[in-house]
Amino acid sequence: MAVYRNLSIRQKQVVWAWGFLALPIVFYCVIRFYPTLNAIILSFQSWNLLGPREWVGFDNYVKLWHDPVFWKAFRNTFVYLILGTPISLVLSFLIAYQLDKTRLLHGTLRALYFLPFLTSTVAMAWVWRWFYQPVPIGLFNNFLASMGFAQVDFLNSTTNALPSILLPAIWAGLGFQIIIFMAGLRAIPTSYYEAARIDGVSSWTIMSEITLPLLKPTIVFLVVFSSIGFLRIFDQVFNMTTNNPGGPLDSTKPLVLMIYQTAFSSFDMGYAAAQTVVLFGILLVVSLVQLRVLKEKP
Amino acid sequence: MKAFKAFTMAAATSLSALIAAAPAQAVEIEYWQYIFDARIKAMDVLIDNFQKANPDITVKQSTFPYADYRTKVAAAIPAGEGPDVVQLFYGWLNDYVQADLIQPLPASNFPADKIEAEFFPMVRAMKIDGNYMALPTAVRSLALFYNTRMFKEAGYDKAPANLDELVAMAEKMTTKDGAGNITAEGLTSGMTAQDHHWWREVLLRQFGGVPYSDDNKTVTYNTEAGVKALQFYADLEGKYGVTKSTFMDEPQAAFKAGRAAMHIDGSFRIGALKDTRGLDWAVAELPAGPDGTKSNYASYWVNAITSKAKDEKYEASVKFMEYITSDEAMQIWLDTVGELPAKPSAAMTEKNLADPVFGPFVAGLGYAQTTVFADESGQRQVLVDAVSRMSLEGQSAADALAAAAKAEQAILDSYYKK
């Protein structure tokens, strides 16, 4: 205590500042960095949760390289990303743009679009899972059958299942993206539009020369945000395919689901950790690329 | 302040005296199982009875959600916490034994020859290096549930005796709408549910195959018999159209909703179906194979003494194990949970065999096989995928089975090389 008493006020302030800063640092070390390091170490080991860990070198990574399921999950993850991000961004921009102009029931409409974002993903995934069932319980197929059309195998198909799962995932995220886009649109000074109108510029030019360039920070934020979301997709897939997780024939399995299954139903923790390290690498690269883009001034 | 210090000292002394005195009179052991209402209730009854007979031992039951169970047990025992007696799925035992979490049952109280004489033969999978490591209270087998109302409408008064009858009856009871969509199934199906057991241990054997080598390390079903068995299973949906694996999301849901005439499931389903309003159902033994072969699949949960139990806790745990593997405990388990006694002497009683619901399951136990799994969900997935490749990608049964055998062998190899 004597040491503290002899400090100057300035030094005491520094001690206190570090005291407060230490809390999040300790938190980050214990909750984030330690498990991350541990997972990286684990990826070079073999462990079934029960016995001791054993060093196996690069075995897990070699196995990963030769595992066709991993490559399928890898491909699926990027399909979720490459389809999901642009579609959800274009949709939410169009809706936000129109909603921004609407005065009638503006608040209600905005709330309606935002509602799915508030709904629990698990509940939503199950409701959609039932929508997709074959007759007699599936809403969509009952409708098709009553109109005299053939049934569509939404989930039990290697080609339809992934888009069928992606659709509710996009729908659920729309509300959030719409709100962000609307905030971005509101932030553009109206004087620009007034000046453009006085000059008699076409509405397409207004869109491409004023609205979109000024929305760039918003767009970049949403691209980063939704890319990470789609790269980490899990809840929707797992809940809509619990009988055959990631199926049929791994056609909907994203990396995160593969990691989950390897770890908690096959109890191959080392192999799961190796997959996690690869996913971590992908997320890191995608985020760094996007941050680089973010840095460029509009 | 001084008075307070004196008070705390006195309190601490008397408390530690109390604690120190306690073990001399009574031992407390801890029992762990996963959360399943009927099982917890049954165990409460067993613990009550046991404590009445052994007033110096108390048993504390702790339960955990199924999803966390394995992790909790694995973390607790090496730390000296956790259960003295633990309930495990039989397929997990190897992992626990290899990790030194389980100690063998003492041969003096559980002699191997006595166990082998008294218990169903499938329990032999619990013997490692000549010692029994764990024993079940109850076992489960498969049977055919059927909807008696749909049977009556179709003019049937008893369940199919063999596979040919199964197909013929299922065809008659399947109803379709104008476009050919199934609106009620003759037979439920789903490799993701119990059908992988039905295929592996029942259909395959009925067509003359054997799933694994005697040491369980080699897949042996990639034979002509295996192809026939897989073709038969795939034909139920593809050729005869009496079932659809995705119908009503889950096979048990279709049967429960009265939209399926027949459904193959385990004895653990009885509880869920018992109180379903408007559903009239009965149970029969699984249909016999083309040459009359009967087979069944049995699985069980075992109880074992963990390596944490020492000295007087170990003695108490042994006593507790003796009680929960007794005939009396098995009957209580059957009445409360609906799972079948693990000993023929308790299971194959006239009363149980004559029971319209338990009877077929008990009879099935007499000729049941048990699969020694390395990774149950992984091995199930192999068969799920084989059927998917046939139905979704048009692969032949022979190719689908060859790929399945290769994938499953890889799972077994990576498990046993450790």
Image (cartoon, grey):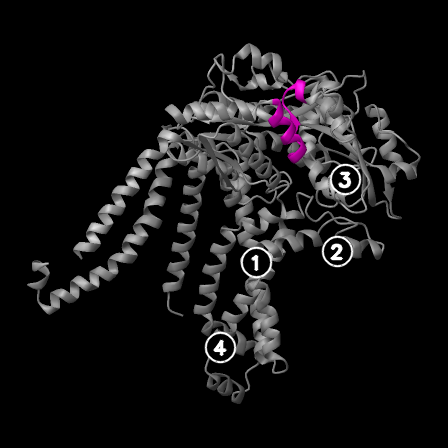
How far is the residue under mark 4 from the one under mark 2? 43 Å
**Callout 2: helix, strand or loop?**
helix
Image quarter of residue B160: top right
Give the magenta part as a residue range: B327-346
Residue for badge 2: A139
Residue for badge 4: A210
Could you tell me the amino acid type at mark 4? Ile
Could you tell me the amino acid type at mark 1? Ser
Mark linked to residue B244: 3
Most extreme residue toward the bottom is A198
Mark linked to residue B363: none
In magenta stretch: residue B334: yes
Locate residue A137 relative to residue A173 in the image: left or right: right
Quarter in which the C terminus of chain B is drawn: top left
Is label 3 in contact with label 2 (beta carbons under 8 Å)? no
How far is the residue under mark 3 from the one under mark 1? 30 Å
Does label 2 or label 1 sit earlier along the sequence?
1
Q: In this rendering, which labeled residue sits more in front, label 3 or label 4?
A: 3
**Callout 3: helix, strand or loop?**
loop
Mark linked to residue A120: 1
How far is the residue under mark 1 from the one under mark 4? 37 Å
